[in-house]
Amino acid sequence: RSIGERYIVFFYRKNDLSYNRTAFLASKKVGNSVERNRARRLMKENYRIWKGEIKEGYDMIFIARSTINGQKAFDVGKSMKRALHKAKMFQKR
């Protein structure tokens, strides 16, 4: 399944394991290597913050869109959080 947001596209699928596997991708459409690496770093940092609240047993891919260039970590985080909420990936409290 996939969910599109302003700065990212989120793909996920159940993997029948007791842990999550994640990938963070940025294609050449995002920009040069500096911009691609920054996009991946922003996504990884926001994922790290919510890692404990996300359900286990999924394969997840976060793909950066070209609109991610020049954005703050907070804005990218809001986009990622919206995608995770739409996918119902957060555990019940």
Image (cartoon, rainbow, N blue to C red):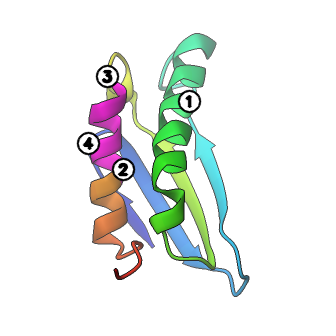
Q: Quadrant of the N terminus?
A: bottom left
Residue 4, picture quadrant: bottom left
Q: Amino acid at mark 1?
A: Arg
Query: Which residue is the site of mark 1?
Result: 41
66 on left or right of 43: left
Residue plotted at (34% across, 80% down): 93
| Rendered location of residue 24, percent (x, y) | 59, 44
Secondary structure at numbered mark 4: loop
- The CA span between labels 3 and 1 is 12 Å
Q: Nearer the viewer, residue 48 or 39?
A: 48
Q: Which comes sooner in the sequence, label 4 or label 2?
A: 4
- Compare marks 3 and 2 and give the one earlier in the sequence: 3
Q: Is residue 3 above or below residue 64?
A: below
Disc 3 and disc 4 in contact, CB within 8 angstroms: no
What whole-number distance in Å separates the C-alpha atoms at marks 3 and 2? 13 Å
Local crowd size for mark 2, using a 10 Å CA cut-off: few (<14), some (14–19), many (≥20): many
Q: Main secondary structure of the magenta part?
A: helix
Instruction: State which tag comes first along the sequence, 3 or 4.
Output: 4
Q: CA distance from mark 2 to mark 1?
A: 13 Å
User: In the image, which residues are magenta?
Assistant: 72-80
Q: Is residue 45 above or below residue 54?
A: above
Q: Which residue is mark 4?
A: 6
Residue 80, labelled with which disc? 2
Q: Which amino acid does the dot numbered 4 rest on?
A: Arg
Mark 3 closeness class: few <14, some 14–19, many ≥20 residues within 10 Å: few
How far, Cα to Cα, is label 3 from label 4?
Answer: 11 Å
Residue 73 location, x and y as percent?
37, 29
Identified by mark 3, the residue type is Gln
First of labels 3, 1 by sequence position: 1
